[in-house]
Image: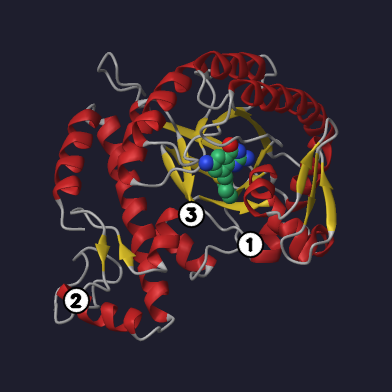
Amino acid sequence: MKHRDEFCQARRGEIQLPHGRVQTPVFMPVGTQGTVKALSHQMVEDIGFEIILGNTYHLYLRPGTEVIADFGGLHEFSTWNRNILTDSGGFQVFSLSPFRKITDEGVQFRSHIDGSKHMLTPESVVEIQRVLGSDIQMVLDVCTEHGIDKKSAHKALTTTTRWAKRAKDAWQQSLGDYRGAAFGIVQGNFFEDLRAQSAQELSELDFPGYAIGGLSVGEPPEVFEHFLHYTAPLLPTGKPKYVMGIGTPDYILSAVEAGIDMFDCVFPTRVARNGYFFSRDGRINIKNERYRRDTQPIDLDSPISMYSRAYLRHLFKAGEMLGPMLATRHNLWFLHTFMTEIRTAIEENRFLEYKNTFLERYGRGMG
Ligand SMILES: CCCSCc1cc(N)cc2c(=O)[nH]c(N)nc12
């Protein structure tokens, strides 16, 4: 179902995956090491999430693919029985590994844990994600930073396309008992012609779904907005569209308007561990003195509404583990509720009204 306004591409959808259906647009919490930090999987399921993220790089290094294989995959190992999307590992190599080298074959790197040498290739990453049992696996790509030169961006794009072809073949050969989807990742940095080239080359490979990579890598908000809205319509319309690494209400609303179906980000859970609570009036830094004797909850509808802001502030000031646990539960509830409201607004053809009303209050807030 698509929103009527001529420029608005917001759409409702449903993705059928091996571990059940996923309603879209959807925000996907990140569970890097087989857990959404500070919450049990049961708590994440109780909030209502149908899919979470895992991370090939981290799980490959620790506990190791063979350990997870012993259990039959990440679902059985972690007891999460809904869908899992796993990132391919390339992005994490560039953001975590103290040494890495890109070759035609793949990416060589040293573990950030013990310095041991490793190599990820398009084929090995497909195999690792098959063993994990990923319901959606991301192919190995080369994500580049904001500000690099066009020649470097083009080299990364062409490597990404070559690797995507190899990954598609390996993924098709992996199918059997394993029924997970593989998504291509569009790169091209912040050059329109390179974005168009990457989208065209990957579209020809006919993946089940597509991600826009290389955004939310430190670029200014207006640059993010431009390249999100430039790239989104270049992706195949009839397949899921995923923007990697966004998880704030303003960015999500903009991406939904551009026709994006899926989002992920560590931001909501990471800031929760530092005492930042999402609210309809903006983000609340609970450590602020103004909440020291505040008897009100963060939000009357929140699953943590039985706790006052004063008590939550105390937990963070005292370094109590319960603080991050409650803040994470609240922020994920907030985002899940937010996405449910977005889906309903699209169904009722009032998404733009919802977006403007939400941002007017959220941006005006104290948070
Ligand atoms: C578990 C984390 C998933 S999203 C990580 C991520 C985040 C951002 N911002 C960009 C990219 C990208 O371009 N490629 C890949 N594989 N991943 C990216």
Q: Which numbered tag is attached to residue 192?
A: none
The image quadrant where one finds the C terminus is: bottom left
Q: Nearer the viewer, residue 47 or 221?
A: 221
Answer with left or right where residue 40 lies relative to residue 5.
right
Residue ID at (19%, 72%): 297
User: Does the beta carbon of the residue at mark 3 sit less than 8 Å from ligand 1?
Assistant: yes
One can see residue 178 in this view: yes
Q: Is residue 343 above or below residue 238?
A: below
Q: How is the image coloured?
A: secondary structure
Amino acid identity at mark 3:
Val
Can you tell which quarter of the image residue 320 is in?
Answer: bottom left
Q: Which numbered tag is attached to residue 266?
A: 3
Residue ID at (65%, 52%): 55
Mark 2 lies on residue:
289
Q: Which numbered tag is attached to residue 33?
A: 1
Can you tell which quarter of the image residue 151 is in?
Answer: top right
